[in-house]
Image (cartoon, helix red, strand yellow):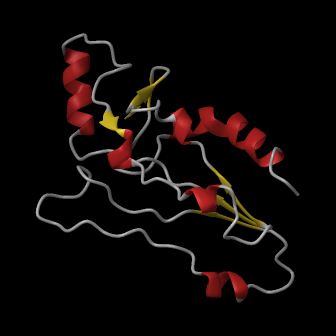
Amino acid sequence: MIVTASAFAGGRGCERPGRARRGRRRLPRRRLAALPPSVQRVIVVRDTPRSSFDTFDCVSRAMKAHQPLADACTLPRSEVLPPIRASRQRNNSAPRWFQVIDLSDFFCDVDRCHPVVGGALVYKDISHMTTVFGTSLGPYLTSAYRNLNP
C-alpha cells in the first residue's frame, strides 16, 4: 500500500504577488502502471485548501478587535480548493485500487474555507496544518481510511 498526498498547487489569491499560478500536478497513469505488482492499493489524501499570505495578519487583527474567529478571514472555497473532477472522485478513470480521502469539509463549508476551526488555528503557513488542527483530524482520517473499499 502507498499513501501519499495529492499535489494540487495554487489557487487565485494564494500565490505570491507577481508570480504566475502553478498548474495542478497529477500522478500520471504511466507512473501508476509502473508500480510493482506488490502494490495493492494507492491512497491519496487530498491536499489542504490553500491559505493566503495575509491569513496570519488577518487572524491577528480579528483577535485584537475581539471579533469572532469562526467567520473571520475566510476565503472562497472555489479559489483555494481546486475541484476534483467528478470522474476521479468516483474513481471511474482510475484503477479500483486507487482511492482518495478528502477531508476538505473539515476546513471548508460549502462556500468558504476557514483559517480557524473549533478555536484551533488551521494553518502554520500557506498550505500546512498546525499540529493542533492536524491532531484533531486524526479520528476522521482513521474513519475515512476504514471506510475505503479494500
Q: Position of residue 56 (x, y in %)?
A: 26, 36
Location of residue 13 with respect to 110 vertically, above or below:
below
> Is 15 on the left or on the right of 27, as rendered?
left
- Where's the C terminus, which quadrant? bottom right
Residue drawn 74% across the image and 43% down it: 144
Q: Quadrant of residue 115?
A: top left
> Is 80 on the left or on the right of 87, as rendered?
left
Can the viewer see residue 56 in this picture?
Answer: yes
Location of residue 25 with respect to 11 vertically, above or below:
below
Residue at the far top in the pictured view: 66
Q: Quadrant of residue 97?
A: bottom right
Give whichever of 92, 8 is nearer the camera: 92
Q: Position of residue 142 (x, y in %)?
A: 75, 42
- Where's the N terminus, which quadrant? bottom right
Give whichever of 51, 13 is nearer the camera: 13
Q: Position of residue 107 (x, y in %)?
A: 48, 35
Residue drawn 63% across the image and 82% down it: 29
Q: Quadrant of residue 3?
A: bottom right
State the count of labels: 0
Can the viewer see residue 125 in this picture?
Answer: no
> Is 47 on the left or on the right of 54, as rendered?
right
Give whichever of 2, 111 is nearer the camera: 111
Residue drawn 26% across the image and 38% down it: 55
Residue drawn 77% across the image and 39% down it: 143
Q: Position of residue 113 (x, y in %)?
A: 40, 35
